[in-house]
Image: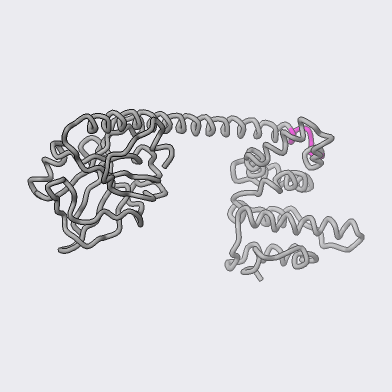
Amino acid sequence: MAERMERMNVNLLNGMSPRLMRSLVQCDKLECGGVVLSEKVAMWLRCRDAAEKEGSSVIPLTDEDFYWLTHVQLMPQVSPHDALFYLNYGANYPQVMNEIGPGSIKSRCLAACSGSWALDNLTAHLDNPEKRSMKLYENLEMDMKVQVLESSLVGAKKLMGERDQLSSSRDVRENDVQLSDEIMYQSIQKQYTSSSKVSKVIVMGAGIAPANGVYIYNPNSAANKSQQKDFPNMTIYEKEAVWNQSSVTFVLYPTSAGQYYTQYKLAVRLNNKMIVFYNSPTVMGVNGVSSRGESGAPLPEQGWEVEGEGVHPPPQFVGKIEQPVSIERSSLTKSV
């Protein structure tokens, strides 16, 4: 029965004695715990109350029973949907509710009351009690109400801090994208005004937004010159950008995957270190470069995967730009 605890409904729990319930929650084979167990125990306690109100005879629940049914080792977290219920029900067991410390049932219930769901419901009730009734809160002793409100204030402050941090991170990402776009447009414009035509690659749909856009093969770049010593036929495409508020170079390059196979990597060069984010499927062909600066191994357009510190999703499309294209002044990195 303990193995099926998570799937038990009201019909199975109804009429169960405190002794049997304790043996279930303390069984080694119990497959649910924490929040789910708190919901099942609360369901059982409500069944007892309902049966008692209907005149049925129920075996009394002792302080010891309530203590072990809600023990922190079995129920480290309380469901926010049942936190106020436990605070109300626990008033009948002051010996348990008067315990102090983070492991006490009262502390775990107050922690559950500080979450976003509980905060939204309590705020709605306090704002309009007639429209949003909350008897479990109103039935609490005044001292317990104060503790719930204090816990809610702490939770609200924490949530506001998390939202501010998310907003700040979003602003940083958007600024990175904007600056990366400006750098990319300048680089493309410079290539268009040049008499020599070089190979370009476009990356679209990568989870790291500044990595999207147009990559340019520059045979005179430091990276290409360095690679030529060990791999004379290797082609490296680069894109200058801003990532995490730092000026970086995103690099698209082939690597050997056996004697006759090649795999491409998309990485960022930061402080002379290469951090790989994505890799392509393995393709047949060796690292070769033609007189036009094109790799002999075909560049896979799809099927890329996340690697290392990459962010999902991987690039949805990677392909060569065969002919000059007209670039509108709209963010490539935002739209892909």
Q: Which residue is rendered at x = 36% and y = 52% of the image?
A: 306
Can you say which quadrant of the picture contains the C terminus?
top left
- The image quarter containing residue 270 is top left
- Name the spot of residue 219 as percent of width and height, x first: 14, 40
Q: Decide which of 48, 323 is in the foreground and name it.
A: 323
Report the label total: 0
Residue 277 in the image, given as x and y percentages of width and height: 32, 47
Looking at the picture, how far across and down is residue 191, in whole percent?
Answer: 22, 33
Q: Which residues are magenta?
A: 139-145
Residue sitting nearer the eye, 234 or 156: 234
The image shows residue 219, relative to residue 49, as above or below, that is above
Magenta stretch: residue 130 in it? no
Q: Quadrant of the N terminus?
A: bottom right
Q: Residue at x 31, y 39 (%)?
A: 325
Image check: 130 left or right of 273? Answer: right
Residue 275 visible, this orientation: no
Q: Position of residue 303 (x, y in %)?
A: 35, 57
